[in-house]
Image: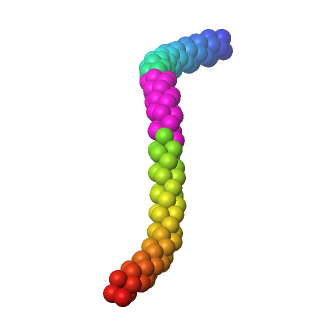
């Protein structure tokens, strides 16, 4: 019976050794997998840093472009203000010309009436003078 106990103990030891070997193999495979994951994560981190850097540069360029557009827009505002001032001046000038034209037209009508009366009076005086000469 002792022999059976030794054989059983020997089988238990062999089984334990096989189990330990499989656990070691599994742990080595797990270690390789974790190393690959670690390398992949490091590469991903580098790529994300590159994207972050490019994004930061793009945002800086966009901000500079927006500032440039705002600056140029402010200059255009001054130009439009100047154009509006010129438009107002032309409008005032046109209104003044209309008033002047209206005044000239009104005075010329009044002067026409006065001139017509003067011609009538002059004709009457000439007629009277001619009649007097004939007599």
Residue drawn at x 50%, y 48% is: 89
Q: Which region is colored magenta?
A: 54-81
Residue drawn 52% across the image and 63% down it = 103
**Which quadrant of the figure has residue 50?**
top left
Q: Is residue 96 above or below residue 133?
A: above
Please state which of residues 12 and 88 is positioned toward the viewer in this rendering.
88
Is residue 73 part of the magenta span, yes or no? yes
Specify whether residue 102 is in view: no
Q: Main secondary structure of the magenta part?
A: helix
Q: Position of residue 21 (x, y in %)?
A: 51, 15
The quarter in which the C terminus is drawn is bottom left
Looking at the picture, tell me which residue is in the foreground, 9 or 25.
25
Locate the N terminus and report the quarter of the image it occupies.
Answer: top right
Looking at the picture, how far across and down is residue 8, in whole percent?
A: 62, 17
Visible residue check, residue 15:
yes
Q: Residue at x 39, y 81 (%)?
A: 129
Counting from the top left corner in percent of width and height, residue 107 is at 50, 67
Q: Residue 130 appears in which quarter of the rendering? A: bottom left
Is residue 104 located in the magenta-colored stretch of the structure? no
In front: 58, or 36? 58
């Amino acid at each position: 019976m002792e022999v059976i106990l030794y054989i059983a103990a020997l089988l238990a030891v062999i089984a334990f050794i096989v189990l330990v070997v499989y656990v070691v193999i599994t742990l080595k495979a797990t270690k390789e997998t974790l190393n690959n994951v670690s390398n992949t994560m490091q590469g991903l981190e580098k790529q994300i840093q590159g994207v972050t850097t490019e994004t930061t540069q793009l945002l800086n360029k966009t901000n500079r472009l927006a500032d440039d557009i705002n600056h140029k827009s402010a200059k255009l505002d001054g130009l439009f203000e100047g154009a509006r001032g010129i438009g107002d001046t032309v409008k005032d000038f046109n209104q003044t010309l209309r008033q002047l034209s209206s005044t000239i037209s009104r005075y010329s009508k009044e002067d026409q009436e006065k001139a017509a009366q003067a011609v009538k009076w002059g004709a009457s005086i000439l007629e009277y003078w001619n009649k007097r000469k004939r007599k």
